[in-house]
Amino acid sequence: MDNTNIQPQGQQINIELGEKEAEGIYSNLAIISHSPAEFVIDFTRIVPGVPKAKVLSRIITTPQHAKMLMKALEDNIKKFESRFGEIRLEPPQNQHFGFVPINNEKVN
């Protein structure tokens, strides 16, 4: 198990990363929905020729933490692109492929 120290706003937090979690899960599709109190992000993987996809991981978080995640991703993408070049988004081949928001006000 790996321990990582993160220091948000002067506070040190010891985060433990288990072996299973360290392997990660590949996802090429995320379904994002929300209610007034929370955001739900379902990560899945679409495989060509397979019409069904199973949710591999679900993250439920507050609107505030969802916005903080968005800002952290924006910051990391800027750093990545300054080092490796622009990440280009090709026109979608399929409307149901990729990371897409679902516009609704009710979470299942």
Image (cartoon, rainbow, N blue to C red):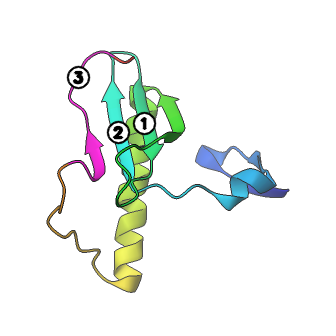
Is the residue marked by circle 1 packed among few (<14), some (14-19), or many (20+) residues within 10 Å?
A: many
Say which residue appears at 75% left-offset and 47% top-offset: 15
Say which residue appears at 50% left-offset and 29% top-offset: 60
Real-space Cα distance between discs 1 and 2? 6 Å
Of residue 95 and residue 37, the one placed in the foreground of this image is 95
Using residue 33 as the reference point, say whether residue 25 is left or right of it.
right
In magenta, the rendered stretch is: 96-106
Name which quarter of the figure residue 64 lies in.
top left
Of residue 44 and residue 14, the one placed in the foreground of this image is 44
Query: What residue did someone put label 3 on?
Result: 104
Name which quarter of the figure residue 81 lies in.
bottom left
Q: Is residue 3 above or below residue 15?
A: below
Query: What residue did someone put label 2 on?
Result: 31
Q: Amino acid at mark 1?
A: Ile
Is the residue marked by circle 2 packed among few (<14), some (14-19), or many (20+) residues within 10 Å?
A: some
Comes first in the chain, label 3 or label 1: 1
Comes first in the chain, label 1 or label 2: 2
Query: What residue did someone put label 1 on?
Result: 41
Report the predominant secondary structure element of the magenta stretch. loop
Say which residue appears at 38% left-offset and 45% top-offset: 30
